[in-house]
Amino acid sequence: MTEAGPAPARVLAAGSAWGRVNLLGEHTDYNDGYVLPTVVPLCTIVELAASPDGRYHARSATLSEQAVFDGPDAKTSGFARYLAGCLRALAERGIAVPPVSIAIRSSVPIGSGLSSSAALEVAFLRAVRGLLGLAIDELEIARIAHRAESEHVGVHVGIMDQMASSLGAPGRMLFIDTRSLHFEQLPLPRNCAVLVVDSNHPRNLSDTPYNLRREECRIAARMLGVPALRDVRRIASVSALPAPYSKRARHVVQENHRVLEARTAEAARFGLLMNASHASLRDDFEVSIPALDALVQAMQRQPGVHGARLTGAGFGGACVALVDSTELATARAGTLADYAAAGYRGTAIT
Ligand code: ADP
Ligand code: MG
């Protein structure tokens, strides 16, 4: 096996998948709400080769780690959990994958809010689809990947990451109604590019209050007597909730409105909606940290930037800005310089 994977002649099937960045609609997906992600030009590639010994072998060039396990139900740790989780979700649908050697390489940064986990699952499932000649479409791939991560890995994420990775396309944004799974490919606002900068504050969903926020949203919905916060019709009813539920619910309700408006918004308005989203994530949902606030401010200050916000679950990871295409390079350089002047070191991703 080479550094990057098995020798090409041994590859039986391969799959790849994009990382994604969410433009608007944060923490709305597990509230049955709306999201608006796009893909970033970074991807994960998974190659499958015959197993040498009847066990599943996995090797990540990105992490320089290897794992060996016996099947979908085997006890796994680290990155192998995502692969075993996919095998298990497939097994639940009656699809048995024979033991294989799985080689992974990726340019999607891990733990930066660009959904390296979904890219891994989707790339792996696409490779398995090729290997077995399965008749499953991209939405089905997303559903299986989502089940793998939420049920078998145990990170209760919404389905946005997996759908964005499997159904997204460069230069387009993907509107998703996470309740019906209705989705639409939409053009980005005219003459716009997407700037993504990593704050270099890594986060891991299982270490953050992500599951706590989900629980707070569930409680808020129950107090309001609705199936999910997506169903709140009157924002006034939210103000009557006790803290912190009123703030959490207000974020979700208003964020859903922002996404619906952004689908057809011009660049300037889209940018204002992104700025409002960041303020709400910082003040009401309380998932920002000083480094993310500094990075967003640095982005918002640059000429040509229409708006910026943290993206992903929060507590670290990347920030995203909508930028006039002609100003992308200067906005990127200016953001990195201003973020450095605030005492941090960022990494440009797009
Ligand atoms: P992200 O926001 O990047 O999705 P998560 O915490 O959800 O962050 O998932 C990151 C985890 O996904 C990693 O810790 C690792 O277990 C797995 N993973 C993602 N990409 C790779 C890769 N290229 N190789 C191995 N494991 C990966
Ligand atoms: Mg993830």
Image (cartoon, rainbow, N blue to C red):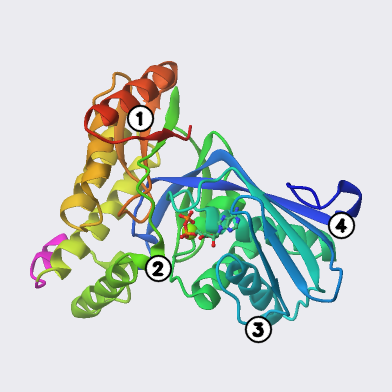
Where is residue 118 shown, x and y percent of the image? 55, 58
Q: Are marks 2 and 3 in contact (CB under 8 Å)?
A: no
Sequence-wise, the earlier of marks 1 and 2 is 2
Q: Nearer the viewer, residue 248 or 139?
A: 248
- Work out whether mark 2 precedes mark 4 in sequence or the reverse, and give the earlier one: 4
**Helix or strand or loop: what does disc 2 sit on?**
helix
Q: CA distance from mark 2 to mark 4?
A: 34 Å
Q: Quadrant of residue 191?
A: top left
Going by the numbered disc 2, the residue's amino acid type is Ser
Q: Amino acid at mark 4?
A: Leu
In the image, is the residue at mark 1 within 8 Å of ligand 1 by its beta carbon?
Answer: no
Q: Can you tell me whether the CB of the residue at mark 2 lies under 8 Å from the nearest atom of ligand 1?
A: yes
Mark toward the start of the polypeptide (3 vs 1): 3
**Mark 4 highlights which residue?**
12
Q: Earlier in the sequence, mark 2 or mark 3?
A: 3
Q: Is residue 92 above or below residue 51?
A: below
How many angstroms separate mark 4 from mark 1 (CA)?
A: 46 Å
Q: CA distance from mark 2 to mark 3?
A: 21 Å
Percent x, y for residue 70?
73, 80
Is residue 240 rendered magenta in the image?
Answer: yes
Residue positioned 32% across, 21% down in the render: 334
Type of amino acid under label 1: Glu
Q: CA distance from mark 1 to mark 2?
A: 37 Å
Task: Read off the residue under disc 1.
Answer: 266
Nearer to me, 29 or 314: 314
Residue tagged 2: 206
| SS category of the residue bearing label 4 | loop
